[in-house]
Image (cartoon, rainbow, N blue to C red):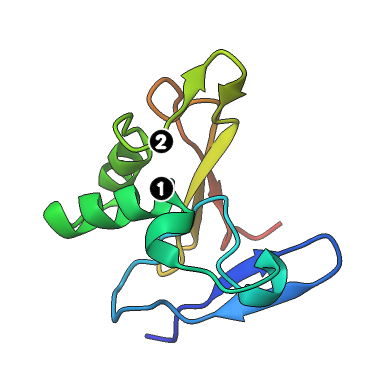
Amino acid sequence: DGDLVDIEVGSDSIALRKPPIETSHLLHTNCYLDTGLAGGTVDENTVCLRLGTARNLYREHPPGNAEEITAILSDHTGGICVHRDGAATIVSFVAEIHRGNFHVITGNPCQGSPETIDLLQDT
């Protein structure tokens, strides 16, 4: 029941961003949305095709669990899951903060199986 924060990490700085809409999920792709990290003004609707696709899929079919979010990450129509000559998705993840689970998919999300890390496990 806390606030969601999007953490963007650059080579020499970090930016914290609030989600643009009231939501229980935070979507992020591999482009900077913070103007400082991006080096200027950012139009979120045109700069990052992947993010726009993910947001559209989220609105059309709101996910209820990690598997359904992984299905969004596996989409091929808008550049989310990429595997073609010279380009590839190398890792995807879904964080279930309320459950303390961090699901990591190495390689293409449409082909990989998530490895779940229990962040609440006593180590």
6 in relation to 111, above or below? below
Q: How many marks overall?
A: 2
Amino acid at pointer 1: Leu
Q: Are marks 1 and 2 in contact (CB under 8 Å)?
A: yes
Seen as rendered, the residue at the extreme right is: 12
Residue 103 seen: yes
Residue 95 seen: no
The answer to which of 43 and 10 lies nearer the viewer is: 43
Q: Position of residue 118 (x, y in %)?
A: 54, 53
Which residue is at 53% across, 69% downward?
42
Q: CA distance from mark 1 to mark 2?
A: 7 Å
Helix, strand or loop status at disc 2: loop
Seen as rendered, the residue at the extreme top is: 85
Side of 76 relative to 44 (left or right): left
**Mark number for residue 79?**
2
Which residue is at 60% across, 62% downward?
32
Q: Position of residue 109 (x, y in %)?
A: 43, 30
**Mark number for residue 91?**
none
**Quarter of the image containing the C terminus?**
bottom right
Q: Position of residue 63 (x, y in %)?
A: 22, 54
Which residue corresponds to mark 1? 49
**Quarter of the image containing the N terminus?**
bottom left
Q: Residue 34 appears in which quarter of the rendering?
A: bottom right
119 in relation to 90, above or below? below
57 in relation to 34, above or below? above
Q: Position of residue 40 (x, y in %)?
A: 65, 72
Amino acid at pointer 2: Gly
Near mark 1 (Cα within 10 A), the count class, few <14, some 14-19 or many ≥20, is some
Side of 121 relative to 53 (left or right): right
Which tag, 1 or 2, sits closer to the chain's start? 1
